[in-house]
Amino acid sequence: SKPSVLVCRAVFPEVVERLKTWFEVESNPGDRAFTKPELIERLKGKVGAFTTGSVTIDAEVLDANPQLKVVSNMAVGYNNFDVPACTARGVLCTNTPDVLTETTADFGFALMMAAARRIAESEHYLRRGEWSKWSYDMFVGSDIHGATMGILGMGRIGQAIARRGALGFGMKVIYHNRSRLAADVEAQCKASYVDKATLLRESDHLVIVVPYSKESHHAIGAAELALMKPTASLTNVARGGVVDDAALAQALESRQIAAAALDVFEGEPKVHPGLLRVPNVVLTPHIASATVATRRAMADLAADNLIAALGFGPNAGNPPSPINPEVLRA
Ligand code: GLV
Ligand code: GLV
């Protein structure tokens, strides 16, 4: 009989059908996120799990399911996995890099523009029926072209955003990252490395693309916001928790910075009430990778990873994007 896998959230039926070629597949009929006890129960007897960012795989889940061999995340970020705990138990983790890079960069750029040019705020004003006259200073924002864009976290997505700014909009691009990029990569995206304080002080538009980790927790808090220009915008397409949302709400309310745009939140799907109160922030429900083509590519890659990691299909034993490949070698 075929090995069993759990698909933790609803996904394209065609992708589930493909998994059924190789596996007994248990789906999540209601597509409500499993509670931890439900997840532990559903994983009983499963050797693989197809997960999304809302599915937490930690030591408790693993210890209750020692038969589990592979967890395949349909996301590039994987802070929902305790990777060291997985590695220690010989569980392979995979994610979906590359296929979402350009789509996510498009959205990050769009959010930055929406914040700088006050697109959401002015649209709400129009819908409220308040547009009765023109004034010279109605919804004046700040320019994108010619401005300085700062990028915190210069991975694939950060580089794709940098290229848009430098090549498409004539922006000056500065970045800060744990490690400096190679000179040829810097040249390709016309980006200059600066220290974090310089990044905060000089950016007209700051874009956060750094993965969440203990080290990046609240990388942007009150002290960092205090260094930014009063005319600056801040955009977060990385993860909730990289920005201190309470401190950001305060900085927006007091106009310490001009505007923000957020696709990710601490404790999402809840949103800090302070952010819901201020007009100068654009809020979207974690949709940066949400195009039809890209979500399908992510689902296909997550399926490819699960199939190959469990020893089936054309790439048996060689999943395309392992996070802890040392498990494969062991
Ligand atoms: C989405 O947030 C992802 O990590 O792919
Ligand atoms: C994040 O992991 C990225 O691809 O930039």
Image (cartoon, helix red, strand yellow):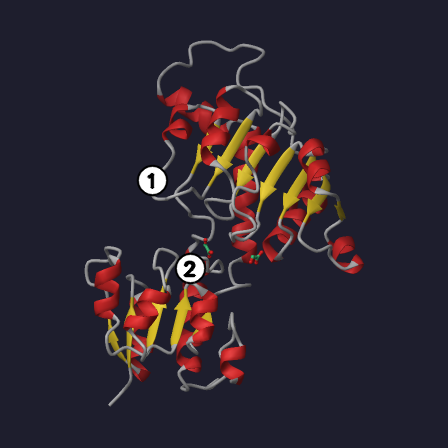
Q: Is residue 205 left or right of residue 276?
A: right
From the top left corner, tell me how far across and down residue 277 is, in percent.
39, 24
Within 10 Å of disc 1 (Cα), the crowding (few <14, some 14-19, many 20+) is few
Mark 2 — residue?
295
Res 122 seen here: yes
Q: Which mark is residue 179?
A: none
Identify the residue at image location x=29%, y=84%: 3
Residue at the farthest bottom position: 1
Mark 1 — residue?
270
Residue situated in front as seen by the camera: 268 or 141: 268
Identify the residue at image location x=50%, y=31%: 248
Examine the rendered structure and indicate whether residue 265 appears above or below residue 116: below
> Mark 1 falls on what kind of element?
loop
> Given the image, on which type of amino acid does mark 1 rest?
Lys
From the top left corner, tell me how far across and down residue 124 is, in percent.
40, 24
> Given the image, on which type of amino acid does mark 2 rest?
Arg
> Can you say which quadrant of the picture contains the N terminus?
bottom left
- Asked where in the image residue 263 lies, by quadrant, the reply is top left
- In whole angstroms, how far apart are the C-alphas of marks 2 and 1? 23 Å
Res 145 seen here: no
